[in-house]
Image (cartoon, helix red, strand yellow):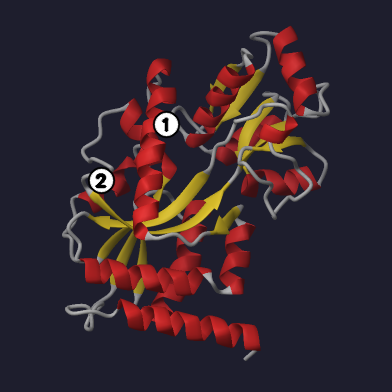
Amino acid sequence: MTKSRLIVTMLGAAALTAALGAGAADYPARPIRVIVPQSAGGSTDVAARVLTDKLTESLKQNIVVDNRPGAGSLNGTETVAKSAPDGYTLLLAFIGPVAISPALTKVSYDSVKDFAPVALVAAGQYMLVLHPSVPAKSLKDFVAYAKANPGRINYASAGNGSPLHLAAELFKARAGVNMVHVPYKGGNPAMADLLGGRVQVFFSTVAVARPHLQAGKIRGLGVTTAKRTPALPNVPTIADSGLPGYAVSGWYGIVAPRGTPKAAIDKLHAAVLVAVRQPDIRDKLLGVGVEATEVSPAEFGRLIDTDIVRWNKVAKPLNIIME
């Protein structure tokens, strides 16, 4: 064992020991189910399985991934909201169903009242990419081109009301451009039509865009966050490329039903910290375009609150109907 890995292991053991309080010593006493509200094989599912493999080691208990796709990720999210608050049913939450969907459609849960934040696992950027036929080498070039061609540029999204859709709409508003929205059922079919030239613009996840960008099949103008991503360090940020203040971040995190005992939340949080501090886990998460993150449950809760307010302001005036 290397010295750095020994230090990580010792820190993890200390964190788990500190999390053990009254009533938590026997938790978990049976397998834990982590519901992923999307299909198997996608980046959300991959992130969940990378994490749960390490949680199984730390907690000495099986962690079962349960994929519950459907209704724009609402089905699995609603399932957890209605589950017993005993620490044995968790949600791999992300920005869409937690912070955006409640502004677009009627849901049976309240993202603040029905969920207890456990741990923010990773945060990630989206990326503005173009088909090579668009005569723009920089963000400033593209904004000028879009303004000169209002309504003649088609941009793809992963679906009505998806985070990628809202990222593009925020860009349109900030840049003052008029582009036509073409929704798809997921990021991969949207990318396929971008590659084919049927659409010209796509706000993509880094995971979907990276292989095509590296192959020279598309052009990347900027990532949506305030800093560059280690996954593609040569791609600048949109904010630094001519649109100051533009910043959009996706995230994955673990939440539990509200009322879950604090001792269980503390132990789960400590186990997540052990996982995300492992170099191999950080590398695997970076492989799906997100960076491992360490914040407290309270800080994660404040992020959820902030995103709910922010995306309500963006989404409601658009009158978007979720598919």
> Could you say where residue 206 lies in the image, as x and y percent from the top left?
64, 46
Label 2 sits on a secondary structure element that is helix
Q: Given the image, on which type of amino acid does mark 2 rest?
A: Glu
* Up/down of 270 relative to 195, above or below: below
Q: Is residue 81 left or right of residue 19?
A: left
- Residue named by callout 2: 78
- Is residue 138 toward the left or the right of residue 118 in the image? right
Q: Residue at x 74, y 8 (%)?
A: 148
Q: Quadrant of the N terminus?
A: bottom right
Residue 36 screen position, x and y as percent: 38, 54
- Quarter of the picture holding the C terminus: top left
Q: Residue 160 lies in what quarter of the image?
A: top left
Task: Give the residue displayed 42% in from the left and 69% down from the top.
Answer: 272
Residue type at mark 1: give it: Arg
Would residue 67 be seen by someone viewing this image from the given angle? no
Disc with the residue nearer the chain's start (2 vs 1): 2
Provide the residue designation for mark 1.
Answer: 310
Nearest to viewer (mark 2 / mark 1): 1
Relative height, residue 52 to residue 301 (above, below): below
Q: Is residue 165 visible?
A: yes
Mark 2–mark 1 distance (CA, rounded to whole Å)? 22 Å
Provide residue 218's location: percent of width, then percent of height: 77, 36
* Figure quadrant of residue 60: bottom left
Give the crowd class for mark 1: few <14, some 14-19, many >=20 residues within 10 Å: few
